[in-house]
Amino acid sequence: MTAISHRVPLPFTTERLVLRLFTTDDLDDMYAYQGLDEVARYLPRSALTRDQCAQSLARRATGTAWAEDGDDLVLAVCRADVPGVVGEIVLKLASPHERQAEIGWIFNPAYGGRGYAAEAARAAASLAFDALGIHRLYARLDALNTASVRVCERLGMRREAHLVENHLDGDRWGDEYIYATLASERKDVAPTA
Ligand SMILES: CC(C)(COP(=O)(O)OP(=O)(O)OC[C@H]1O[C@@H](n2cnc3c(N)ncnc32)[C@H](O)[C@@H]1OP(=O)(O)O)[C@@H](O)C(=O)NCCC(=O)NCCS
């Protein structure tokens, strides 16, 4: 397996946050948010059990590949001055040949409303473009996920698609937004409060 950590300058520090790889010691912190139904509300899967979180961390401890469609880099987001994980950012390779990647974010609601998600996402976008050479970075979200919409817009991403009733969320037909940013638009990737 080709590890990408050598291609990405980690840990990566922002004004208030540190982005790093997860370790198996992060289980309690990860389960604290991944185990919540409210966090999984707009994710295409249920909340995770503690065992699922442990398995995910164990898998990641063996290395992270970045070569094939679907390979992902999952970054633990910590506050610079306090130990513990407050959320995560995922960069998933969608097309190696076309250098496209999907970005996603999941944060512990206990640390919501402070701009951490937008700050971490901006840092991850920098890593995607500068360290990983991505051409196009995009996000897909349920149109009802207004908090996530705001993160995209704070990053200056363009809403480039509104897919109508393209997925089932239980019994509800959900709409999806696709937001994107190109490497050539980088100057626009700047969060505002
Ligand atoms: C999506 C998600 C990460 C957004 O979290 P969030 O807390 O709303 O986003 P941020 O951390 O960027 O915080 C933004 C808020 O902090 C406020 N804020 C407070 N202090 C701030 C500061 N110093 N700097 C910047 N913003 C600040 C902003 O004004 C903003 O408030 P608003 O949302 O009322 O406009 C979170 O809702 C989540 O994890 N949801 C569940 C998982 C999910 O659905 N993921 C997306 C799947 S597509």
Image: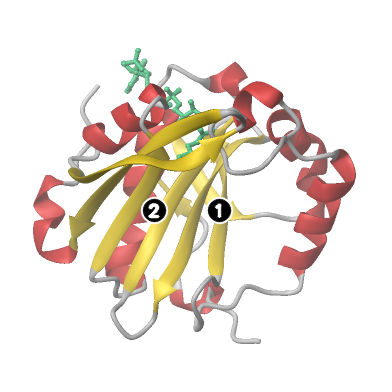
Q: Find numbered disc 1 in the image and state the secondary structure of the residue it sits on.
A: strand
Residue at point 46%, 59% (across, down): 91
Q: Residues within 10 Å of mark 2 (few under 14, many from 20)?
A: many
Q: Is residue 10 left or right of residue 46?
A: left
- Residue 158 x, y percent position in the rendering: 17, 45
Q: Quadrant of residue 136?
A: bottom left
Residue at point 58%, 37% (across, down): 87
Q: Residue furthest right?
A: 51
Pointers 1 and 2 in contact (C-beta within 8 Å): yes
- Residue 144 x, y percent position in the rendering: 40, 25
- Residue type highlighted by circle 1: Leu
- Residue 80 x, y percent position in the rendering: 52, 36
Q: Nearer the viewer, residue 184 or 171?
A: 171
Q: Find numbered disc 2 in the image and state the secondary structure of the residue it sits on.
A: helix
Q: Nearer the viewer, residue 30 or 103?
A: 103
From this view, report whether residue 167 is shown above or below residue 11: above
Residue position marked by numbered label 2 in the rendering: 124
From this view, report whether residue 92 is shown above or below residue 35: below
Q: Which mark is residue 75?
A: 1
Colour approach in the figure: secondary structure
Which image quarter is the C terminus in? top left
Q: Quadrant of residue 169?
A: top right
Task: Mark 1 or mark 2: name the one nearer the start of the chain.
Answer: 1
- Residue 65 x, y percent position in the rendering: 58, 78
- Let me know if residue 115 appears in the view: no
Q: Residues within 10 Å of mark 1 (few under 14, many from 20)?
A: many
Q: Is residue 171 left or right of residue 191?
A: right
Residue at point 38%, 47% (across, down): 140
Q: Is residue 43 left or right of residue 132?
A: right
For ligand 1, the image quadrant comes to top left
- Let me know if residue 165 appears in the view: yes
